[in-house]
Amino acid sequence: MSATLVLTNGRIHTMNPQQPQATAVAIRHNHILAVGDDDAMRALLAPGGEWVDLHGRALTPGLVDAHVHFQHFALGLQLVNLDGATSLDDALTRIHTAHRSPLTAHWLQGRGWRIDDWPTRAFPTAADLDRLVPDRPVCLRDKSGHAAWVNGRALRMAGIDDQTPDPPGGQIQRDAAGQATGILFEDAMELVTQHIPRETPAQIAAAMQAAQQHCWQVGLTGLHDFDGRDCFLALQLLREQGELGLRIVKNVPVYRLEHAIGVGLRSGFGDDWLRIGSVKIFADGALGPRTAAMLAPYENDPGNLGIVVTDKEEMMEKVSAASAAGLSVTIHAIGDRANHDVLDVYEAVRAEEKSRITHHALRHRIEHVQIIHPADQPRLAQLGIIASMQPTHATSDMEMADAHWGERARHSYAWRTMLDSGALVVFGSDAPIEKIDPLPGIHAAVSRRRADGSPGPDGWFPEQKLTMQETIFAFTTAAALTGGQADRLGTIAPGKLADLTVYGRGLFTTPPDELLDITIDATLVDGQFKHRTF
């Protein structure tokens, strides 16, 4: 059998233990035909086939982001960008500029603000927005996505006044006089967001077409998505039209669980482009707005233990029902109490599963595992629970973690601890909360440092660093294992799908401080160049 494409003269890191390295790979249409040295692979090239000299570039299996909100990422390219705003005034300047643009819709939306980046570290208010935008509703999500800043017009449209009770799993922030300030936490955001007109699946699909171009440019070949029904419809539209160029594992929000069970969906259903993943549940909030559920109060905030979004009893009911229907579950857990409660639930459900699992254990996950009590650290491996983590959260959040968790912060973003315990660790970005680009995540994982070198040469809690091999595994092979795709993806080996990422220099030989200077020179999906610079 002959090859239609041969890549030679490369530094190929296959992630295949039987053949860890090579210099060339032969591809036939969309599958890997063979892996080996330059001469042997060139000999397989069919007449009229393409030969590409990599000129020493590094090559790995295609990078996969195992935690993305793809609809929100795609649509977010059109919103007010408050990420990196250094003060309230900076944020207000960006909002004012967007408000005056003739291209903005009736609602002014944005995201990315974070009070820990502002000198005052005080929450903004509806009054701040009303001075600039009094005549149209405004909704601006914070960087974590667990708080929203709205103006007076939005509060009035939502019917929020001094008498409005906090909804279950949410909180309306109030001032000393009991008046709503314009900050909404967790499920309280829905009081406003339910009034924002939704984009149609066709509009979302159009935004995704531009977004996937960006994904290819940063080396991504696949995503695990965590958005809702409209996102799934848009992805299906792209798939039907032959325009889906990323391999998607689609997770199902828990409020659709009854429908998923009703039509008989099971984890793994689908094809190589779009398949069902897990049922997504929120156990708690996030670190930024201090809503992550904690076993002990936040530093300097003695009455605050965070917010439990889904209580343990309800979580048990949902996880048990999903598992019985053949659906794995993935649970957002940031705080140490949330992670403890989730592990208790998974332990009970694993006991239920022992009586009925005949093929393989369901691939249950915890999303983020941001801080975990030492007593709970071995439990993910013991229960076969996947630790889905995001390296850039550590470098973005390290100052907040130190400030709000104090000494407990040494047990946060504990990739090495998780890996050494025997748990499967898979990496992602949580875009649009962080950049979707994998290279900053790779840099964070091996250095525990920001791009500017802070907090110093050793990094933040350097004992949690990973090697480059472990990091690339988490972005490739672990993603395939998590998605139930290891027979098709995750390593460069004969018979696997030809999804590959090409780097501008030697990834494994570049010093950590220079990793962010590496370019993505090519991305192949299904044996085709989707991005190429040489």
Image: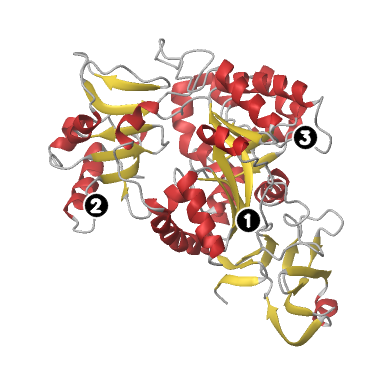
Residue furthest bottom as drawn = 47
Q: Secondary structure at mark 2?
A: loop
Q: Which residue is mark 3?
A: 361
> Residue at the spot x=70%, y=50% of the render?
480
Local packing at callout 3 (Cα closer than 10 Å; few below 14, some 14-19, many 20+) is some
Residue underneath mark 2? 105
Q: Is residue 412 above or below residue 512?
A: above
Above or below for 522 versus 177: below
Which residue appears at 67% of the width and 42% of the height? 267
Indicate the quadrant where residue 25 lies: bottom right
Relative horizontal placement of residue 109, taking residue 57 as reference (left or right): left
Q: In the structure shown, which secondary structural element does the residue marked by tag 3 occupy?
A: loop
Q: Amino acid at mark 1?
A: Leu
Residue that carries the numbered disc 1 in the rendered image: 63
Q: CA distance from mark 1 to mark 2?
A: 35 Å
Q: Residue at x 23, y 58 (%)?
A: 103
